[in-house]
């Protein structure tokens, strides 16, 4: 199953500023997502619930860690707001693939929880530069909270539960506009 991550987040350019008409999933990610979903569905059908849960957690942990190391924490990766939104879209696609693979089974009620740390990192990287109607926190506001003494306020505003202040600082530094 781990072979499905070979092409995920393989893109090395998250720093593009050109906004396409709409964000689209990278076609190279479709096959790994489909394979992952099908294999998770197969495991849920053939294994006992407890084994499926443990294996699912292990697999998602491995994939999340791989994406975090290659796409978020890699020294060469820098993000613009658009790049962060693209990463967020990819993470949401992995979560949706999990839901689809586990659809119809009651093995795991909230498959998205296993993706929490990666999802939170992508949400931080996707923070808007400017105030928008649907977003209440901008990247600059978040930076002030993350590098200041009010990180708890950002955790509350964004619903961050898995990301420590130190991790958030490292993630924020991946944005091209970070001056810290």
Image (tube, grey):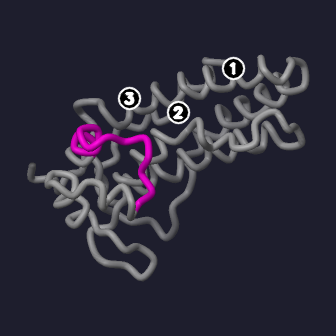
Kindly identify the residue that appears in the image at 83 percent across and 24 percent down.
49
Mark 1 and mark 2: span between their CA atoms? 23 Å
Question: Mark 1 against mark 2, which lies toward the viewer?
Answer: 1
Residue situated in front as seen by the camera: 92 or 21: 92
Mark 2 and mark 3: span between their CA atoms? 10 Å
Side (left or right) of 71 relative to 1: left
What residue sits right under mark 3 in the picture?
70
Kindly identify the residue that appears in the image at 45 percent across and 31 percent down.
67
Query: Looking at the image, is mark 2 or mark 3 earlier in the sequence?
Result: 2
What residue sits right under mark 2 in the picture?
8
Query: Looking at the image, is mark 1 or mark 2 earlier in the sequence?
Result: 2
Q: Find residue 143 and report its horizontal and vertical position in percent.
A: 20, 57
Residue 133 bears which disc, if any?
none
Query: Looking at the image, is mark 3 or mark 1 earlier in the sequence?
Result: 1
The furthest residue to the bottom: 133
Q: Find residue 25 and report its horizontal and vertical position in percent.
A: 57, 51
Q: Is residue 129 magenta?
A: no
Quadrant (top left/top right/bottom left/bottom right) for the N terminus: top right
Residue 22 in the image: above or below residue 46: below
Kindly identify the residue that appears in the image at 28 percent across and 74 percent down.
130
Magenta span covers which residues?
158-171
Kindly identify the residue that appears in the image at 40 percent across and 73 percent down.
135
Picture quadrant where residue 101 is located? top right
Residue 46 in the image: above or below residue 119: above
| Badge count | 3
């Amino acid at each position: 199953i781990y072979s499905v991550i070979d092409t995920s987040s393989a893109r090395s350019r998250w720093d593009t500023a050109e906004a396409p008409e709409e964000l689209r999933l990278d076609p190279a990610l479709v096959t790994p997502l489909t394979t992952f979903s099908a294999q998770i569905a197969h495991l849920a059908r053939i294994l006992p619930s407890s084994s499926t849960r443990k294996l699912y957690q292990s697999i998602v942990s491995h994939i999340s860690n791989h994406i975090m190391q290659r796409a978020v924490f890699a020294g060469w990766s820098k993000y613009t707001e658009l790049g962060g939104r693209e990463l967020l879209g990819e993470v949401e696609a992995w979560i949706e693939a999990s839901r689809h693979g586990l659809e119809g089974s009651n093995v795991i009620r909230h498959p998205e929880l296993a993706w929490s740390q990666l999802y939170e990192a992508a949400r931080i990287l996707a923070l808007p530069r400017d105030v928008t109607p649907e977003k209440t926190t901008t990247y600059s506001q978040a930076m002030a909270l993350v590098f200041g003494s009010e990180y708890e306020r950002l955790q509350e505003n964004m619903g961050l539960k898995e990301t420590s202040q130190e991790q958030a600082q490292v993630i924020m530094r991946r944005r091209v506009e970070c001056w810290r």
